[in-house]
Every structure is written in C-alpha cells, then in structure tokens.
C-alpha cells in the first residue's frame, strides 16, 4: 500500500520526465534559438562598448569579447543580478552608450528569460499533457477489454447457473436466480465489480426486462 501511494505521489514527476525525454529534439532547437539571441545581443554590446571613451576598463571587462559577453548575458537571462548590470550601465557607464547598453540588457532579459525560457517550459508541459492523454486512452482501452471479458464471463455463468442447460432454458433466468448468482457465484461477483454495476442496477434491469418472472440473458447482457 505504501508503494502504491509513493507511485501515485510521483506520478506527476514521472510525466514531466517523460515529457522532457520525448521533447528533447524540440528543446535542442529552443536552446539553439536562445543561444542565437544571446549571440545577437553580444555582438551588438561588443560593438557599442567600443564607442567613444570613458569607463573603457569596465566595458572591456564586461563586454570585451563575444564569448565573455554571451556568458554575462546567459547569467542575466536567469535573472541573476540583472538589476545591478542595468544600474551599472545607466549610472556608472552613463551617457548615450550606457543608456543603450542598459536598454539592451533589459530587452535581452525580456526576450530570453520571459520569452524563450517560457517557451521551453511550455514545450515540456505540452508534451507531458500529450503523454497523460495517451495514458488515459490506454487505461480506457484496457478497461474496455476487461469489461468485454467480464461481460462474456457473466453471460456464460448465467447460462450455466443452476440446472442449465440440461433441465432449464439457457436463454432465460429468473430474477431470484439472478440475484442468487450475484450473491453466491464468485465469477459473477467479480464480473459485476469489473462492469462497475450495483445491485440496484440489476433491480432496474429486472423491472425493465422481466416477463413472467424471468429475464432474457442476452437482453440483460446487451443492456
């Protein structure tokens, strides 16, 4: 019982992991897109850092190379210390160059952290939902197969209940015999549980199909 509860508790996690595995190809393209955007912003920042003069050491340290700038922007894209980078551009670098650099950093955060990375999460969730839908369909198909087998067993057991088919017709069964089979025959009881039927359901069926105290077995199964 503890194992069953444990499996149910981690069901959502397993769905997310399955979604991650199945969407790995799409995720690779999504991360490639993020890298492409980081490269685009890095090229612009490296070129802007070479404008004019003033605070060149700081700009060279931050945005002196494309690789280093991409690393800086990758950290900013995770919202790591991005506010300090923007304030540094506006108030330390200053001027038109600092204003442009700060705006570019903000734009990079919006496009990557709030845009592309949300797309990545959406891809994983969408795939997980698809897997969950497939699992529900698979479970429903299994339930349908089990119910068809249970209905076949139910029909067979009713046709052989009591003195059938030697001394009584195997096409009809009395209502009292039906409830006796439901109470005493293990196979009939199990089929009833699989079909998710209650005793009150059989009472209603007997009322609907009863003729001279008997009901047709085939009509009962079809209903």
Image: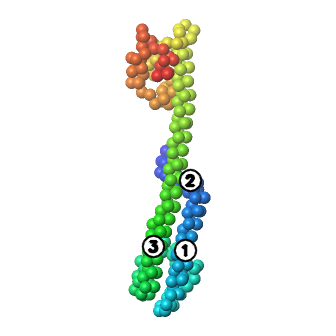
Q: Secondary structure at mark 1?
A: helix
Q: How many marks?
A: 3
Mark 3 → mark 2, Cα distance in angstroms: 33 Å
Mark 3 → mark 1, Cα distance in angstroms: 12 Å
The residue to which callout 1 is attached is 40
Place of residue 107 in the rendered image (x, y in percent of width and height, measured from the top left): 45, 73
Q: Earlier in the sequence, mark 3 or mark 1?
A: 1
Callout 3 crowding tier (Cα within 10 Å): few <14, some 14–19, many ≥20:
few
Question: Is residue 209 positioned above or below 74 on the image?
Answer: above
Residue at 45% in and 69% down: 110
Q: Earlier in the sequence, mark 1 or mark 2?
A: 2
Place of residue 27 in the rendered image (x, y in percent of width and height, measured from the top left): 57, 61
Q: Earlier in the sequence, mark 3 or mark 2?
A: 2
Q: Nearer the viewer, mark 1 or mark 2?
A: 1
Residues at circles 1 and 2 in contact by the CB criterion of under 8 Å = no
Q: Secondary structure at mark 2?
A: helix
Q: Which mark is residue 107?
A: 3
Residue 80 appears in the figure: no
Residue occupying the far bottom of the picture? 54
The residue to which callout 2 is attached is 18
Callout 1 crowding tier (Cα within 10 Å): few <14, some 14–19, many ≥20:
some
């Amino acid at each position: 019982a503890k194992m069953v509860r444990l499996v149910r508790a981690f069901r959502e996690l397993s769905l997310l992991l399955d979604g991650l595995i199945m969407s790995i190809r799409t995720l690779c393209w999504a991360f490639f897109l993020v890298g492409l955007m980081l490269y685009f912003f890095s090229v612009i920042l490296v070129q802007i850092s070479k404008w004019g003069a003033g605070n060149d050491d700081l700009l060279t340290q931050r945005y002196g190379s494309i690789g280093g700038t991409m690393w800086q922007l990758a950290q900013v894209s995770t919202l790591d210390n991005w506010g300090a980078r923007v304030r540094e551009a506006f108030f330390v670098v200053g001027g038109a160059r600092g204003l442009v650099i700060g705006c570019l950093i903000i734009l990079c955060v919006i496009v990557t952290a709030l845009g592309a990375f949300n797309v990545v999460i959406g891809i994983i969730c969408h795939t997980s939902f698809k897997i969950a839908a497939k699992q529900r369909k698979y479970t429903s198909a299994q339930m349908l197969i089990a119910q068809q087998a249970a209905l076949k067993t139910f029909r067979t057991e009713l046709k052989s209940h009591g003195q059938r088919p030697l001394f009584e017709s195997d096409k009809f069964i009395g209502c009292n015999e039906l409830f006796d089979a439901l109470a005493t025959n293990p196979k009939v009881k199990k089929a009833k549980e699989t079909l998710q039927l209650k005793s009150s359901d059989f009472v209603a069926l007997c009322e609907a199909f009863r003729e001279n105290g008997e009901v047709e077995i085939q009509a009962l199964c079809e209903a």
